[in-house]
Amino acid sequence: MSESTTEQTQNGELQTLQTTVQTQTGELQTLQTTVQTQNIELQTLQTTVQTQNGELQTLQTTVQTQTGELQTLQTTIQTQNSELQTLQSTEQTQTGELQTLQTTIQTQNSELQTLQTTVQTQTSELQTQSAELQSLKTKELTENGELQTMKTMKLTQTGEMSSLKQQLSQANNEARSQNGKNTSIIQQLSQVGGGSTFVRWGRTDCPANLTELVHSGYAGGSWYDHTGAAVDYLCLPPDPEWLQTTVVPNAYTGRIYGAEYESNTGHFLFGPQSRDEEVPCAVCRSTSFVSSVMIPARTTCYSGWTKAYSGSLASGNYNNKAATQYVCVDENAQPLAGGADRDDNGILFLGVKAFCGSLRCPPYEQDKYIACVVCMK
Ligand SMILES: [Ca+2]
Ligand SMILES: [Ca+2]
């Protein structure tokens, strides 16, 4: 290749390079302009960011303040909730009390109505009574007139009564005089009447008001098993008097023993202890009757007779050798003190029972104890 060709080539390349440099210079200028623009925008952005940071800090401060206020509000709300619950509880209590008060008021209203009714009734009764009172007053006026008339009559009758009293006084005096005479006659009659005597077996006292005691003592008699025994029950006095003090030999005599109730144990015919107790007695005299009689198998007297005492018919044992009598032992028979301590026998008191056959049954009944009564006339 020639030198001109080479030079031409290199000139071409140089022109290309210059063109490239020019292009790149243009681009560089464009880039610088862009960078400047972007720097301006960057500065604007930085300013904006700084402004926004300031606002953010302000907002954070505001949020903190509001958070504090919120907590205060929550505390306030809790306090108010608690107060609300207390108020609700109080309200419930007051509602209950209100209901009770309403019930009480209803009850009192009801009572008030009842009272009003009562007052109305009483007012009505009062009016009725007032009317009756008025009527009675009218009646009283009428009766006062009648009373005046009666007073006049009374004055007249008082005079008559005075006269009658004098007559009565005279009659009383005569009656007193007659009573004195009658008493004297009764005394004389009582001395003439009375005098009947009897023995009350089993007691030391006599029937009250009707009789007087002659003496009391101990029942006695013969030995229950002696063949020659005397039959009498005697009422021996407690203060014997003696003809002589000689002790009599054991022959040619009668004998006196004491007496015992000898009823079967458990029969209680002569009191709680009817066996081996010793027997008291009383001799009695009627103060107004002249006759006396012991009636067997009766507890009361016949008409016209007065009862002295009644009790159980008694005698000795039918199977013993000694004969006895039937006597009447008082229904409230008593024992002599200490008599049950020993079984001494003597003359015996046994209950007497009915034995049918020749004895009419009925009216009698087999094996029943016979009662008795002493009557006076
Ligand atoms: Ca005895
Ligand atoms: Ca005995």
Image (tube, rainbow, N blue to C red):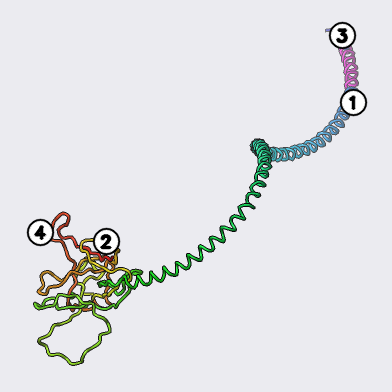
Tell me the mark number nearer the camera, choosing from 2 and 4: 2
Left or right: where 165 falls relative to 1? left
Disc 1, ligand 1: is the CB inside 8 Å? no
Closer to the chain start, of discs 3 and 4, is: 3
Residue with the mark numbered 3: 12
Closer to the chain start, of discs 3 and 2, is: 3
Tell me the mark number nearer the camera, choosing from 2 and 1: 2
Tell me the mark number nearer the camera, choosing from 1 and 4: 4
Q: Position of residue 20 (x, y in %)?
A: 86, 13
Q: Is residue 237 visible?
A: yes
Which amino acid is tagged 1?
Gln
> Is residue 30 magenta-colored?
yes
- The stretch of residues the image draws in magenta is 16-39
Q: Main secondary structure of the magenta part?
A: helix
Say which quarter of the image contains residue 276: bottom left
Which amino acid is tagged 2?
Cys
In front here: 226 or 231? 231
Name the image quarter holding the C terminus.
bottom left
Closer to the chain start, of discs 1 and 3, is: 3
Which amino acid is tagged 4?
Ser
Closer to the chain start, of discs 2 and 1, is: 1
Image disc number at residue 358 = 4
Closer to the chain start, of discs 2 and 4, is: 2
Residue with the mark numbered 2: 301
Q: Is residue 96 visible?
A: no
Question: From mark 3 to mark 2, how far is it between C-alphas?
Answer: 201 Å
Q: Residue at x 67, y 37 (%)?
A: 131
